[in-house]
Structure formats: C-alpha cells, structure tokens
C-alpha cells in the first residue's frame, strides 16, 4: 500500500501567538491525508525538532494542540511534515514580549508640595500657610506604563488649626520602613478629612486609588482621572503584588487589571475583592489570574487600579470615635540630599492597603 504524498499549507494567526505559547496552528491539506501531518519547530529555520502535538482533523484541516514553553520575544519557524517529508512551507512567528509595568516597586518618584492654610476663626484673623507633601510615582522611562494617584482628593485648602493631619492628608503616601522589595513602598488609605472643627465628624472620606493613567491634581479637579490605561502589547496570565492590609468594618480593598485591544475594548480581565477582615501585618504575595474573553484580538493597552476600599468612600462619621483608626503616620520626606521617614500627627483612616512589587506573569 502506497500512501499519497501529503501537501498543503500551515497557518498561524497573529493573535494566536502569545508570549510563551502558540495556539491552534492549522494545516490544510491540498493533497493526501491531513491526519498524517506532524509539526516541527526551529529557532533558525535550519535545524528542526519534531513536536508531539497531535492534530484534530476536520475535513482537510488538522488543528494542532497548543505549543507551550516558548521564550518571549523570540522568533521560531514551524512546518508540517509527513514522516520525513516536508508537507508545507515554513511559517515564521515571533512571540510577544513579556512586558512588565513601569516602576513596579515605586523606586522612582517625585515628592510634590501642596500649600494649604488655616486660621482659628474663618471670619476673623489672618491665614497661616502650611506645606503638605504628596507623591507622584512615575517611571523614568517614558515608554513604560505610568502610575497615577488620586492623592489630592483628600487635600483640603482652608482649614482650622486643630488636628491638621486629619484635615489635609493624601490618600497615597510613600513609605520607607521594611519594604517588601527595594527601598520604598506605598500606603493606599481611605482617608477621612474635614475643613473645619476639631475632628472629622462632619467631613468626607476618600478612597485611596493607584492606577495606570493620568490624574488632574489641580484645586478644581481634586485627583480626577483624566485618562485610564497605557500602551501595552503583551497578554500576561496574571498580576502579582506584595501587600499588607488593615481592614476596617469589613471594607475590603480591590484590585482590577484589564487588557484592551486597539479600539480600547476589553479582551481580558482579572479582579480581586479581598474579604479578609483581620489585619495582615506581614508582607504577603497575591496572585490575580487574568481571563481572556476575546481570543482573536491582540492587546494594545493595559489598565490596573488598586483601591483601598472596594465599596466606595465611607462617611467619616463611621470613622469618628474609633481610636484604632487614628493611625500614627510615618511617610517619606526629603532631608538634604537623602530621603528619610518622618512621623507626624495621627490621621483618620479606614481600610489601608500597603503595596509593593507589582509584577506580571506569563
């Protein structure tokens, strides 16, 4: 019995090539039996190795199982074989890069100054100016994704002098003592502030946010998102980060990661709504798998957001009178040519997320 010679074409869609895998390569037979087709792979188009991936046959097509274990940002050649005979022309593919987020451990930052003022009686006397610091955790490389915060949302401009840190404190602060990685990390807090009075009973509580995009921190906009997401052409399998968490009144933190196509339509998503109610005093690693609902599109943008509260801002009335919320705060300020930890007045804070070392897995 002489089997007919197998001939045809091998097709790999661009969107089926990921960072470490290729899915659904299809051999279409124009002569012979497609069930006889096997695959070979090469890193230079000259030296070939056989693959054990079996093909599922439908009509004249053989669809091969996923090829895994590939290296990111690497060129490969694939070809179909019939025994020792070549059944298709080679097809060149290049895997996606395993891109990472910019400034993942918050080692790059600017300390921004914010001037507010106070006086004892709003309708009498003169104002006294006070400087408060907040932080931009930018990436030095402009080609990397950029972080933004809503820090100025809890910075009030005119207050009475009692408990100044209750009344004007950023939602996101830079910390230095015992980071999980590098030299610095962030504290993202639900912060209760107020303009007047001796406490925050009648004030507002603001959920702290760190996100990929840009924010308008002007007096009028108060940390509003002016853009969300940044250019990103890889499709990771998970978002990971180191964190500690103090949960107030069963109010969990939340994290969301989204991948968008070139039209900014979501193709993949990962979400975490942490329901733990106890304080986590030690650094722990969290892993958020990313599930892709659209498989025939490449990624063009990524959006990540961390929130100190998954349920939104609470009334500061809920914070008031709870001594456990009066956090004796430490943050980073510049002293000469170095950065030091500075302890200041207590602040009113609800749920608090300490964050470091944000990474992507592939």
Image (cartoon, helix red, strand yellow):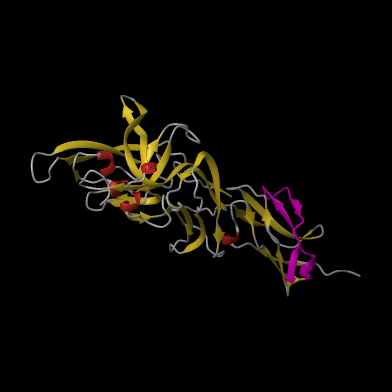
Q: Is residue 52 visible?
A: yes
Foreground: 66 or 208?
208
- Tell me if residue 360 comes above or below residue 24 in the rendering: above
On screen, residue 169 versus residue 127, left or right, reads right
Foreground: 360 or 234?
360
Residue range of the region highlighted in magenta in the rendering: 32-57
Foreground: 250 or 118?
250
Direction top: furthest residue: 336
Q: Residue shown at 70%/61% (left/top)?
A: 65
Q: Is residue 113 visible?
A: no
On screen, residue 307 versus residue 282, left or right, reads left
Direction bottom: furthest residue: 59
Residue 202: x and y in percent read: 25, 52
- Tell me if residue 317 comes above or below residue 26 in the rendering: above
Residue 124, quarter of picture: top left
Residue 93: x and y in percent read: 61, 55
- Tell me if residue 19 comes above or below residue 34 in the rendering: above
């Amino acid at each position: 019995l002489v089997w007919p010679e197998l001939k045809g074409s091998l097709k790999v869609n661009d969107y089926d090539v990921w960072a470490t895998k290729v899915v659904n390569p299809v051999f279409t037979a124009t002569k012979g039996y497609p069930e006889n087709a096997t695959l070979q792979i090469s890193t230079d188009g000259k030296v070939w190795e056989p693959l054990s991936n079996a093909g599922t046959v439908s009509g004249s097509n053989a669809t091969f199982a996923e090829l895994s274990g590939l290296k990111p940002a690497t060129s490969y050649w694939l070809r179909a074989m019939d025994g020792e005979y070549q059944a298709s022309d080679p097809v060149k593919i290049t895997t996606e890069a395993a891109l990472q987020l910019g400034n993942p451990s918050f080692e790059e930052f600017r300390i921004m100054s914010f001037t507010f003022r106070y006086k004892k009686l709003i309708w009498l006397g003169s104002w006294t100016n006070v400087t408060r610091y907040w932080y931009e955790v930018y990436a030095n490389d402009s080609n990397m994704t950029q972080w933004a915060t809503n820090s100025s949302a809890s910075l009030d401009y005119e207050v009475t002098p009692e408990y100044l840190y209750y009344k004007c404190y950023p939602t996101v602060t830079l910390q230095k003592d015992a980071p999980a990685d590098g030299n610095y990390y962030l504290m993202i807090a639900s912060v209760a502030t107020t303009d007047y009075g001796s406490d925050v009973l009648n004030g507002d509580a603001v959920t702290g946010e760190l996100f990929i995009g840009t924010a308008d921190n002007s007096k009028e906009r108060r940390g509003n998102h002016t853009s969300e997401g940044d250019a990103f052409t890889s499709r990771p399998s998970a978002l990971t980060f180191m964190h500690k968490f103090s949960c107030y009144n069963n109010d969990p933190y939340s994290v969301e990661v989204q991948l968008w196509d070139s039209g900014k339509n979501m193709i993949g998503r990962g979400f975490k709504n942490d329901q733990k109610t106890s304080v986590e005093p030690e650094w722990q690693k969290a892993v958020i798998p990313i599930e892709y609902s659209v498989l025939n599109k490449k990624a063009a943008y990524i959006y990540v957001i961390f929130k100190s509260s998954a349920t939104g801002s609470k009334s500061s009335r809920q914070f008031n009178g709870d001594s456990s919320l009066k956090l004796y705060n430490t943050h980073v300020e510049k002293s000469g040519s170095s950065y030091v930890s500075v302890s200041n007045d207590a602040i009113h804070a609800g749920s608090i997320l300490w964050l470091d070392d944000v990474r992507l897995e592939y």
